Amino acid sequence: MTERADDYGQYWDLYVRSIFPQIRAHDPAGERLAWPGDEWGTPEIWERIYQMVFAPELEPPPARAIEIGPGAGKYTGMVLDHCPTAEILAVDVSPAYLAVLEERMAPAMAAGRLATAQLLPEWDHLARLVAERGWRGSVDLVFSIDAMVHVDLQYLVAYWMAAADALRPGGKMIMSVADATSPHGFEKLMADVPTYFATQGKITSKFEWLCPPMVAHVLNRLGFDVRFLPKLAGRDCWFVATRRPPQAG
Ligand SMILES: C[S@@+](CC[C@H](N)C(=O)[O-])C[C@H]1O[C@@H](n2cnc3c(N)ncnc32)[C@H](O)[C@@H]1O
């Protein structure tokens, strides 16, 4: 395994196989870190996020959902548990993270409620995966939490295009992205300067910054009505983007 990543997938493989084990080894409460991703928050916080962000939006519960960047599946598991009719396609650039997800979610995989796919560095790969499943225009929910904070808008917009193609009219995309205009976002932007300046554009876990007007403008052009979730606004900008019917888009 190279210690240098040339693309997003390689970086997150490195995170799972090398960086996360080091974090766990140096954490005095390391035994609480069962899966990579457990180091970001606590089960109480993730449950609160589910109740505040997902629960009000998932009535009726989704039948078809797509998750981008599931990591080890903390939100995948919650959506599967709370929405007994949901079938999820979980896509990620990192084969190592997908292997962890598949291990943790083995019962859901066996029950046919969860399928996984590695995203290749091809701009329309997600849209093709959706088309291959016969899901175009029929998906109820696309979601991605704590993942797209790391993805540059020039890449992210390809996922937003794929989501516009996949979702049925009225279907929802729930997402968090990094907000440089929020007080905490601005603090992190400044605090990270010494860490990331020397990386000179290499792929790392640095944040890729956005702000609500950019999110609203681009998604509106792609056929979505965007609602921000101010109660969650901290470092990140949280939003629900609802797919307009194509004729109005
Ligand atoms: C910080 S982890 C968050 C994982 C999970 N959503 C959670 O909250 O625990 C970031 C996730 O996004 C994935 N990811 C990073 N860059 C990506 C990209 N360009 N496209 C899709 N997934 C990406 C990583 O492989 C990883 O699974």
Image: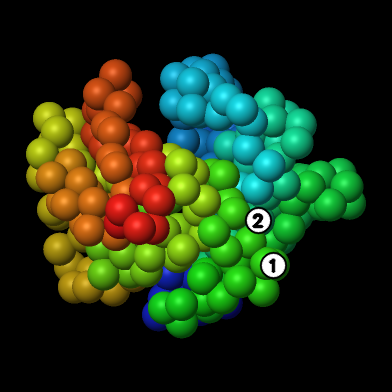
> Which residue corresponds to mark 2?
89
Query: Colour scheme in the image?
Result: rainbow
Circle 2 SS class: strand
As rendered, which of 207 and 226 lies closer to the eye?
226
Quarter holding residue 191: top left
- The image position of residue 237, as x and y in percent, is 26, 37
Between label 2 and label 1, give the one nearer the viewer. Answer: 1
**Position of residue 229 in the picture relative to residue 118 (left or right):** left
Crowding at mark 1 (Cα within 10 Å: few <14, some 14-19, many 20+): few
Instruction: Indicate the amino acid at tag 1.
Output: Arg
The count of marks equals: 2
Q: Which residue is mark 1?
A: 133
Residue placed at 54% from the left, 59% from the top? 137
**In the orientation shown, which residue stands out farthest toward the front?**
247
Residue for point 38% across, 65% down: 161
| Quarter of the N terminus within the rendering | bottom right
